[in-house]
Amino acid sequence: MPALTFVDHLRIERAVWTVDTYLSVLPMRRQREIRRELRANLRASAAQVGSKAAVRNLGSLRRLSYEYLSAEYRGRPWPIPFKGAAWMIITAAFLLTAWTVAVDSFRAGLADAGAPPGTYTVHWPLFGFGGEITVDSSGGFTQHTFTLSLLVWLAWLLGAFVVGSRLWRVIPRWWDRLRHRRAQRDARAAAAEP
């Protein structure tokens, strides 16, 4: 059994962390277990056939990850965090656009109404933000500032992430547990019959 070289360790770690990246939807504890198991198996195999052949014998790392996920979720679809992140970005862009349109509409309304120069503050609950728009239109220059609650922003973005990634798929369905219990009960009953 030859000792593993530094390059062998790097090759094994690259394979382990590639699989771990694909398994990012699993709970951290389960990811750690899979990493340890895969690392131990690759080291044992690399000691016999070499690290290059050991990693090659795994086949496609994406396919291996898919099989882990299928086994973990019992064939059910799993959440997709990248899609959730995309939904967060789209939601943030939409909300910023809507807020900018609201501020510009307020400024245009002040100009159309012929409001005298000064500072105007209005509380505008747009999309549940509860923000304040302050417009300073003195001296022919119009400037606006607005404040938003950080918790409201985070709630909107977290909601978009949950919906976009379908995070509820992580929670095991109650009927899966019920079906598993029934199968165990039936197996015990079958084993107890003479």
Image (cartoon, helix red, strand yellow):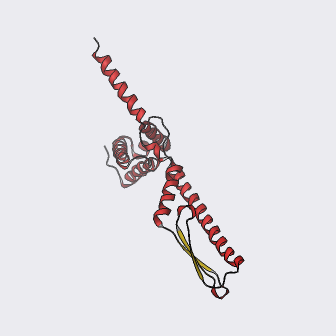
The percent position of residue 56, horizontal first and vertical second, equals 46, 42
The percent position of residue 105, horizontal first and vertical second, equals 66, 70
Which residue is located at x 69 percent, y 78 percent?
A: 111
Tell me: 14 left or right of 106: left
| Quadrant (top left, top right, bottom left, bottom right) of the C terminus | top left
Which residue is located at x 32 percent, y 17 percent?
A: 190
The percent position of residue 165, horizontal first and vertical second, equals 51, 49
State whether residue 9 is above or below residue 130.
above
Tell me: 91 left or right of 26: right
**Viewer-proximal residue among 130 and 69:** 130
The percent position of residue 123, horizontal first and vertical second, equals 55, 71
State whether residue 62 is above or below residue 135.
above
Tell me: 36 left or right of 67: left
The residue furthest bottom is 139
State whether residue 177 is above or below residue 115.
above
Which residue is located at x 49 percent, y 45 percent?
A: 79
State whether residue 192 is above or below residue 168.
above
**Viewer-proximal residue among 117 and 3:** 117
Tag count: 0
The residue furthest top is 194
- Quarter of the figure with residue 175: top left
**Viewer-proximal residue among 51 and 176:** 176
| Quadrant (top left, top right, bottom left, bottom right) of the N terminus | top left
